[in-house]
Amino acid sequence: MIEGNIVSLKRACAIAGVAESRLGVVPDSTVLTLQAEALVAALADAGLEKSDVDGLLVSGAWGRLPGLQIAEYLGIQPSYADSTMVGGASFEFHLGHAAAAIQAGLCRVAVILYGSTQRSRADKYIFQIRNDLGYQYEAPYGLPTPVGSYALAASRHFAQYGTTSEQLADLAVSTRNWAALNPKALRREPLTRDDVLNSGPIATPLNKLDCCLFTDGGGAVVVVSPDIAKTLKKPPVWLLGQGESVSHAQISEMPDLTVTPAAKSGARAFEMAGVTHRDLDVVEIYDSFTITVLLTLESLGFCAPGTGGEFIANGRTGPGGEFPLNTNGGGLSYCHPGQYGIFLIIEAVRQLRGECDERQVANAALALISGTGGVLSSNSTCILGVE
Amino acid sequence: MTDETLPDPDSEPYWQGAAAGELRYQRCGACKTAIFYPRALCTNCGAPDPDWSVSDGQGTVYAVSVVHRPPPSFSGQAPYAVVLVDLDEGFRMMSRIVDAAPDTVAVGDRVRVIFRDDPDGRPTPYFTPA
């Protein structure tokens, strides 16, 4: 291994604007209209114009050459373009890449974009069943993907550490309790542990309500250079640290089903930011499934290996709990249009700006977001702060 | 699940083995790492052209999920147990349990390979309690 110090991205860029498009079931839209909606709203939030945008970072499984199609549709000719596609975590990767590009002077106003109409228009879907290349060794066995892969990871954690379905259910309940405070969340009605346990097995040990929603939706994040950030109306949200890691594509190739690539990306993000777990005020972790959160918390070092079940149980991560987690209601109860990671950034920025009304975490100044893509395959972790 | 592109140049010896009742895998000639699925290089040291070997087909269940909501092409077969098996030679693969009730399979169980035709009639390795 070639060892060496990486260049820090601390304060290389700030997030100046965030927005969602319409979310949920949006039949009168396409992937392009939703991204245009989100872009317009995020630029307005930032106080910038479309003509200011010189960097474009996109990801998706729709259309042909989506990075070109969206730029064309929006009428943007970026001088810096990134179509990194590593599943739902792509946007946290994009944030690090935008920071590096801005630091290198390759662009000054970069937009991270996403949209999906998977619910209403049956878009080509990132988890389309495949039987080629490496997938030919899994395809004959009928594992539903992605849920079956996460179920295998859960089964391993249960067997190795004694984690229980009740503990996972408690996370779903806490997340729903946050959603109840978010007017944009799709599922806001009360939920109990028994509701989750009795929601019906999909792939054991995961039940239906251990799984994220299946929605339409889009989002946009405007990332700017430090000099521009200081000229804008809203307080900048600084990128303080970022790390990324890719482990595998299919679950049979994951080295240890209880340790995700967040272990590597998180360590780098914490080192870069120069902060510790206890300094954080709010945490947003990709919740494609309840088990995703448990494994990510352990891999990031919030709790020891095997103790994630206790960590998330009994409402600890819900409103009023000691560990505010997934404060928008998450992919489990707010929205999940295929690749959810962009919404982690949007919620963290709003929490740090104090824009979250009923669900606002008091005095939130430092946030961690951690995106997971594929089947626990990729992770990027970012630490954001207002100071 | 037949795909007219299969087998491909990497996988042909593997599927030929399955048709002959052999579970074939690769081992690196340089660092001796067991490699699965088949590749043109060692995933550990990068040496090209790993050697082919035949597994005894004995292993331990590393993870198991009983599928209740299968993909459309498997509808009607559920419930069934999909497993990750750690073979004694040091590689891991996905498979499915046959000839046993799906909910009786647990992490740590010993299993052995058994060849059956997959839904498209291709000989495929499955596992059954040892």
Image (spheres, coloured by chain):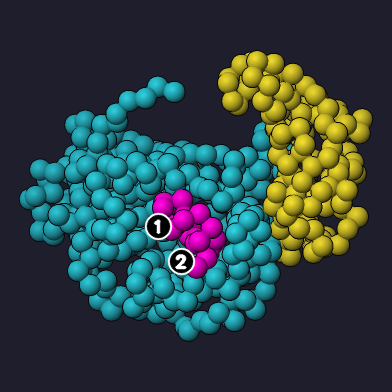
Chain colours: A cyan, B yellow
Q: Which residues are magenta?
A: A288-310
Q: Are marks 2 and 1 on the same chain?
A: yes
Amino acid bearing label 2: Phe
Residue reaching furthest to the left? A231
Indicate yes or no whether the magenta region holds residue A290: yes
Please report the residue visible at 33 percent of the width from the left and 35 percent of the height from the top: A81
Please report the residue visible at 86 percent of the width from the left and 29 percent of the height from the top: B17
Q: Provide the secondary structure element on which disc 2 rests.
A: helix
Residue A201 % position (x, y): 68, 69
Label number found at residue A302: 1
Mark 2 vs 1, N-terminal side: 1
Q: Are marks 2 and 1 in contact (CB under 8 Å)?
A: yes
Label number found at residue A335: none
Number of numbered discs visible in the structure rendering: 2
Which of the 4 image quarters holds residue A33?
bottom left
Q: Main secondary structure of the magenta part?
A: helix
Residue A294 % position (x, y): 50, 60
Left or right of A44 on screen, residue A118: right
Please name whichever residue, A187 or A42, is drawn nearer the observer in this view of the structure: A187
Where A32 sits versus A3, above or below? below
Q: Is residue A344 visible?
A: yes
Residue A339 % position (x, y): 47, 54
Q: Is residue A50 visible?
A: no
* Residue located beneath label 2 in the image: A311
The N terminus of chain B lies in quadrant: top right
Task: Say which chain tag 1 marks.
Answer: A
Where A273 sits versus A340, above or below? above
- Mark 2, Cα crowd under 10 Å, few <14 / some 14-19 / many 20+, is many
Please name whichever residue, A294 or B121, is drawn nearer the observer in this view of the structure: A294
Task: Say which chain tag 2 marks.
Answer: A
Q: CA distance from mark 2 to mark 1?
A: 9 Å
